[in-house]
Image: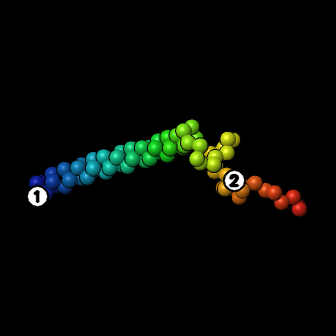
Amino acid sequence: MPNVINFLFIFKYLLSNFQTIFSIKFNYMKLVLHIYFIRLIILSRTHSRSLPLSYNSFIPHPLIIFFIDNDYRY
């Protein structure tokens, strides 16, 4: 019986460590994704003139139309 209890404690310890390792791994992957997208935005603004970007924002021109209110009939 003590062997079973020891095994359970060891199993619980290993399981908690695996959860910690996986959570660190997933947080790292999220960080890498954020860095990738930020880098992509910066590169697209500085090295490419093919994207129709506004000089005042990160939003492409076709999407700006949805945010500009041209209806003044209030």
Q: CA distance from mark 1 to mark 2?
A: 69 Å
Which residue carries the number 2 mark? 64
Residue 70, placed above or below residue 57: below
Up/down of 34 relative to 7, above or below: above
Quadrant in the picture for residue 2: bottom left
Graded by Cα atoms within 10 Å as few (under 14), some (14 to 19) or many (20 or more), the crowding at tag 1 reads few
Q: Residue 1 bears which disc, if any?
A: 1
Q: In this image, 43 relative to 60: left or right?
A: left
- The nearer-to-camera label among 1 and 2 is 2
- In the rendered image, is residue 42 in sight? no
| Amino acid marked by disc 2 | Ile
> Crowding near pointer 2: few (<14 within 10 Å), some, many (20+)?
some
The residue tagged with tag 2: helix, strand or loop? helix
Q: Extreme front residue here?
A: 50
Marks 1 and 2, the one that precedes in the sequence: 1
Instruction: State the SS at label 1.
Output: loop
On the image, the x and y values in percent for residue 59 come to 64, 49
Residue, x 10% and y 54% (percent of image)?
Answer: 3
- Judge by depth and name the residue closer to the eye, 44 or 37: 44
Where, by quadrant of the figure, is residue 71 drawn? bottom right
At 69% across and 53% down in the image, what residue appears? 64
Can you see residue 43?
yes
Find residue 5 and report its horizontal and vertical position in percent: 16, 55
Q: Residue furthest top?
A: 46
Is residue 22 rendered to the left or right of residue 70? left
Quadrant for the N terminus in the image: bottom left
As shown in the figure, which amino acid type bears the numbered disc 1?
A: Met
Residue 40 in the image: x percent, y percent? Answer: 50, 44
